[in-house]
Image (spheres, grey):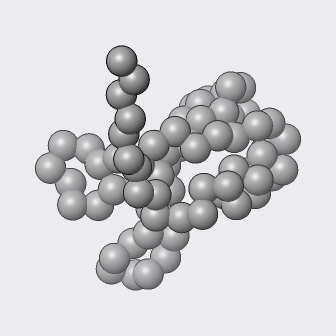
Amino acid sequence: MTLEIGHRPYMDTAKIEKIYSVKDGTPVKYVCTSAFRDEAQAMDIYYRETPHPEFGNKYFGLFHSALTGAL
């Protein structure tokens, strides 16, 4: 049995993967679109195999601010 989950990303995930892969010098892949707990704001989650040199994380999220319009 295969479970299919239909994610509705906010952004062009292929474009974001390319931008951050080039910027960070390591492959970046879209994982899913998710929200934490009761938050009304969801974000697109991305993954990189190597930890970020400054922050040490392998995952990061991007979202569109409904208040400011910024990404």
Does residue 11 appear left or right of residue 15 in this picture?
left
> Which residue extends farthest top?
1
Q: Position of residue 65 (x, y in %)?
A: 39, 72
- Residue at 49%, 76% (x, y): give it: 70
> Which residue extends farthest left?
38
Q: Where is residue 61 in the image (x, y as percent from the top left)?
A: 49, 49
Judge whether 29 appears above or below 51 on screen. below
Does residue 1 appear left or right of residue 9 in this picture?
left
- Residue at 44%, 69% (x, y): give it: 64
Residue 50 image-quadrant placement: top right
Judge whether 37 appears above or below 56 on screen. below
The answer to whether residue 54 is visible is no
The foreground one among 2 and 68 is: 2
Q: Position of residue 27 (x, y in %)?
A: 76, 37
Judge whether 57 appears above or below 43 on screen. above
The answer to whether residue 17 is visible is yes
In this rendering, the count of numbered labels is 0
- Residue at 45%, 43% (x, y): give it: 32
Q: Where is residue 22 in the image (x, y as percent from the top left)?
A: 84, 50
Which quarter of the rendering shows the N terminus? Answer: top left
> Which residue extends farthest front?
1
The foreground one among 2 and 51 is: 2
Judge whether 19 appears above or below 32 on screen. below
